[in-house]
Amino acid sequence: MTFVVATNNAGKVREFERILSMHGHRCITLDEAGIDCKPKESGSSFDENAEIKARAVFDKCAGKYAVVADDSGLCVDALDGAPGIFSARYAGDDAANCRRLLAELGDTPWQDRGAEFRCCICAILPDGEVIFTHGRTRGTIGFEARGENGFGYDPLFYGYNNFTFAEMTNERKNNISHRARALGKLSFILRGVKHIKTEK
Amino acid sequence: MTFVVATNNAGKVREFERILSMHGHRCITLDEAGIDCKPKESGSSFDENAEIKARAVFDKCAGKYAVVADDSGLCVDALDGAPGIFSARYAGDDAANCRRLLAELGDTPWQDRGAEFRCCICAILPDGEVIFTHGRTRGTIGFEARGENGFGYDPLFYGYNNFTFAEMTNERKNNISHRARALGKLSFILRGVKHIKTEK
């Protein structure tokens, strides 16, 4: 299936493309679809924001393409799930957001620095069918930024042994990330993989 | 540090060994430490069971070794966290447990088949200091068993892209598993990595 990715973030388009192509799908950008769209993320949950983004693009597609949008964020256990839907605008840019998160956690010990990235995917198929899927990935917030890959809170998020998400290859991150898991479920649903073949 | 692994499960000892050796620690079995110990897991939480196992072995070590024990299980979102601490004794052996889980979930769609493995590690250092750490790893419960590696619910647990934990190499699983994450935190704590080096 060909999806228009409902985002103006080039990094995010590439990530969708890498993940969905593993499942045999194709992605095109808003530009490639000839769509100009900058919806306001005014929802109060990941689901609402993902749907706002998907619908805004779908309304300009006229059933020509499937649309896929996501909303995602970091939820830190010790901060009652903050920054959550405010992850991208916690303090300003990525570096400022990371600094604020470290300041909020202070010297909270390793034991209590658990966190998870959460992602909601909203896909709208050409016939108007809406599919929501979710993905989460667990990790631990470090005491300093490490690594140059990724974006957002990746340099603080230990999600693969001794490594932060910013120290991982794209390939590896895209196999275990919240976004990869939500898109994986979407792909399973589209393939109709739902057979129960186990013994009674 | 050298840890006695408080379990009679040879597979689990190997998993501890693989993970802790990545952090520079060494593991020995109960046999190698000359300890005979089969504590009853009568606790009502992962923490209680892990501590019961660790203390039982520690009491026979007389401060000669550090001890590490875990208790872990699978918590399925749609089943309010079941089978949880009853994971190992949900229906009987691994195959029966997996069959029961699939039956309980029935045709719950992919969207709602989220789950997580949780692990509590209890370590007791030779001087008696007790350290608890926790790890979780998220995934999705499939509709049939896939793969030959691992144990327990691994064949049902999609945790790495299209693959169940039973279809992954040990090396890969040991970088993202609940046990790996909990042991990783333990290792961070033992190394005293706790410096806040970020800019103000």
Image (spheres, coloured by chain):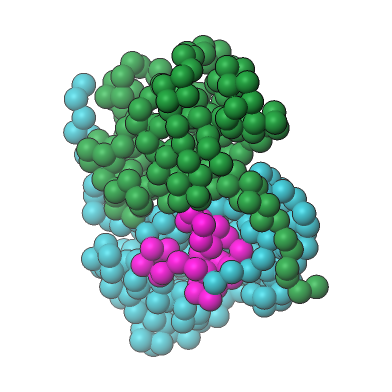
Chain colours: A green, B cyan
Q: Is residue B156 magenta?
A: yes
Compare residues A8 and B49 and report the one nearer the observer: A8
**x and y percentages locating residue A89 in the rendered image:** 40, 17
Residue B184 image point, x, y percent:
35, 56
Depicted A152 relative to depicted B189: above or below? above
Residue plotted at (78% across, 63% down): B103
Closer to us: A147 or B188 = A147
The picture quadrant where one finds residue A186 is: top right
Number of numbered labels in the structure image: 0
Image coordinates of residue B33 in percent, x first then y, are: 36, 84
Residue B15 in sight from this viewpoint? yes
Residue projecting furthest to the right? A200
Instruction: Please state if A154 lies on the left or on the right of A145 as rendered.
Output: right
Q: Which residues are magenta?
A: B148-174
Task: Quadrant for the C terminus of chain B, please.
Answer: top left
- At a point 64% along the width and 59% down the height, the residue shown is B142
User: Does A132 sit above or below residue B108?
Assistant: above
Q: Residue at x 78, y 57 (%)?
A: B106
Residue displayed at 36% across by 86% down: B32
Residue A81 shown in magenta:
no
Residue A60 as seen in the image, left or right of residue A196: left
In this view of the protein, can residue B126 be seen by the observer? no
Residue A86: where, in percent of width, then height? Answer: 47, 20
In the rendered image, the quadrant that contains the N terminus of chain B is bottom left
Give whichever of A171, B1 is nearer the camera. A171
**Relative to B147, is A173 above or below?**
above
